[in-house]
Amino acid sequence: MAQAELIFTGDELLRGEVVNTNQSFLAEALLLLGIETTLALCVPDGRAEIASAIRDSLARRPAVLLLSGGLGPTPDDLTREAVADALGRRLEQREDLLRVLESRFADLGRPMENSNLKQATIPRGSQALQPVGTAPGFYVQEEGALLIALPGPPAELRRMWTEQVDPLLRDRFGLKAGEDHSFVRRLRLFGLGESSVADRLSDLDWRGGPVTIGTRSNADGVLIVLRARQAAGDRETPGEQEASARSRGLDEVERAVRERLGPHVYGTDGEGLSDAVAQLLLRRRSTVATAESCTGGLLGKLLTDRAGSSEYYLGGVVSYNDRLKESLLEVDPALLRSKGAVSPEVAAAMARGARRLTDANFALSTSGVAGPGGGSDQKPVGLVYVGLASADDVEVKELHLPGDREAVRLRTANSALDLLRRRLLAAERSAS
Amino acid sequence: MAQAELIFTGDELLRGEVVNTNQSFLAEALLLLGIETTLALCVPDGRAEIASAIRDSLARRPAVLLLSGGLGPTPDDLTREAVADALGRRLEQREDLLRVLESRFADLGRPMENSNLKQATIPRGSQALQPVGTAPGFYVQEEGALLIALPGPPAELRRMWTEQVDPLLRDRFGLKAGEDHSFVRRLRLFGLGESSVADRLSDLDWRGGPVTIGTRSNADGVLIVLRARQAAGDRETPGEQEASARSRGLDEVERAVRERLGPHVYGTDGEGLSDAVAQLLLRRRSTVATAESCTGGLLGKLLTDRAGSSEYYLGGVVSYNDRLKESLLEVDPALLRSKGAVSPEVAAAMARGARRLTDANFALSTSGVAGPGGGSDQKPVGLVYVGLASADDVEVKELHLPGDREAVRLRTANSALDLLRRRLLAAERSAS
């Protein structure tokens, strides 16, 4: 298996100011290409430190050396210089990059500063990676290693990876577009805790068999990771490897897990709850609207995370203030007075109101005490109602959610999505 | 300044299955004690690899070498063995740890397995750190370096740090409980790119002086980090050090930076744009409402991130579908037809509509092409309008935003917040 090393530059990483999400992104993306990461390190924004890390890494002869960070315009962006030092090459200004940057700034309606000039320089003999923002990357073959320098901001790094680096590496390592080298399956589920999952799967062999089982929990629910151990077959083609992975039992274990967890499983790799809902809505040509209180817009945001969401999401109302619940959603003022905004009755009325207002097939509502203040004995922090209105009825679910304000709000929005998902799933089953 | 190196073990980190949040936690915690992290690395779960990383690190003579991970009971937990190898010490089973583990398992109502026995062994001459879960840590002084081994699960690591390691290091480095050693100031700004910041601050000394300047850009704008270098005074008391740090120029550099960047600076440490807006609204007892299209609810979500937001945020409309722009926000259908939803005219009408609907003092609107699809020559992906309606007028700003869908949407919401922030700031100034 080909090996890679990763070097991240940035004092902010070494002062704990940011969490390094680029590492998990790159390591996972490399693994899909059949490239194993054997070392990852963070070094300070110092020319000598970066150059020395590069030299040490090249001495270990990885097939790929990825750098991230230090390609900006400021004096502490020193990766270009450090690569030039480590490889004994000169930096040269590239006219084509200069022109790309000029047009990029023109598009942004911002003047190009003198400090940006150095972003058009790359080490002699290297190839440019076109800038996503204003930082070009570059790559250069140095003996056995392909050294690739990427910008640090995650959005820029991810797009440059997907559009330029992934195709480059597929080409080098003989992998077609879309063909993956993965021996991992991930299943996502909602509505069960990690320990309940462990309990329901307790008759399966988690670590001893040819396929290992692992779990991890996050706000989207629980993630189950199935991994086929890699045998000696490193020289097989990806197709053969995938086939032998199957024969090693990945399919079989996935089936066993799904049997034990039923409709709690909502998706696989990379799909969020809102993706699962989107697919079901599209399949039924149905639309949804929202009436949000404690989530403040988060539910709508999740429903519009993917492109094309206007096909199924119409919009809705954020009725944070009770007066808007009355004026826009036509919630009965007497109900608000007698039951309070955080009540099953008001959650139901909000969902009905949003549906009436938008003519959507379904409407979701949220109302709860997100905290940290605002709780009482009768309505403590974490008490939440999510509602679902359809042509036939209104369903309301009461939740008691742990965690801080952010966790309660995210969990509330996801619970509303899951309510709709299960309804759509049930409708699909009864129709077939 | 004392220096630390961090070594993280775990194949899951090198496969990208988990994000390494322990690194930012430890680096930040060390900095509060006046200890600077100069290198962080992730190595595989291999005895030889871990031992070699430890030896290399000790050769660089850091004051502290922190290890995390590999203290569990499974065959791939190898940190104990690797430390013993690197230091040339034997592992010994400790009777006291064995008894702690036995009682821990009794509490959990679980049998203690044979595999747990090895968790009671630590290298000869080291001190045990009491287990939070079932994994004891340990520390050992090796010539100039204090080597500390901590478990990998973040909850266990954090509690072991707070209860046992933080007091230990305070004792070693002469710092009282609760007394911090922080010499950093952070300034946040919006509306200027990193390169414009670099240009405006180009007459300041970024790296050579007693206070270094660094920048980092994210969706909230640009973060400027000012850091006072620690001089010879390592033996001063923290109070004296803070005073001398001031005299070494932290205040002076902050003032110089603020002069050059004016109202672009919106806050300091830990404050987001929505916090700055919240404070200004509270001070003027003003309220705001929202009319969102491309952000789908994200703007409302940001405005309600902090507790107590109902004091200034009333709510609004997510008019993702154009019909809702007409029916709820009373945007003229002829305007939508002639100018399109993504136009300054419609953004203005949306903001006016939201203000009328809610009686808020201000209303913000967003409309744009978030991508990746849906762009045209005239209205490319990244073209966005944000609007601000007040009692007096409506202001609309046109933006051309780079990046993917997520980046465009976050930047759009933040641009709307910044538009309101500047308006409130100007009103405050003209009133005083």
Image (tube, coloured by chain):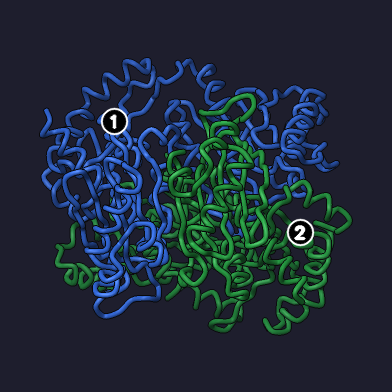
Chain colours: A blue, B green
**The N terminus of chain A - image quarter:** top left
Q: Residue at x 26, y 58 (%)?
A: A349
Q: Which of A360 and A412 is in front in this view?
A: A360
Asked if disc 2 and disc 1 are in contact, CB closer than 8 Å, the reply is: no
- Looking at the rendered structure, the secondary structure element under dot 2 is strand
Total tally of numbered discs in the picture: 2
Please state which amino acid type lies under the numbered disc 1.
Answer: Arg
- Looking at the rendered structure, the secondary structure element under dot 1 is loop
Do discs 2 and 1 share a chain?
no
Q: Nearer the viewer, residue A368 or B329?
A: B329
Give the chain of mark 1: A
Please state which amino acid type lies under the numbered disc 2.
Answer: Ile
Q: Is residue A405 visible?
A: yes
What is the quadrant of residue B102 in the picture? bottom left
Q: Position of residue A302 (x, y in %)?
A: 40, 46
Q: Which of B295 and A317 is in front in this view?
A: A317
Query: Which mark is on residue A334?
Result: none
Q: Which residue is drawn at 34% across and 53% down?
A: A413
Seen in the image, is A281 located left or right of residue B331? left
Q: Where is residue A410 in the image (x, y as percent from the top left)?
A: 37, 56
Circle 2 is placed at which residue position? B213
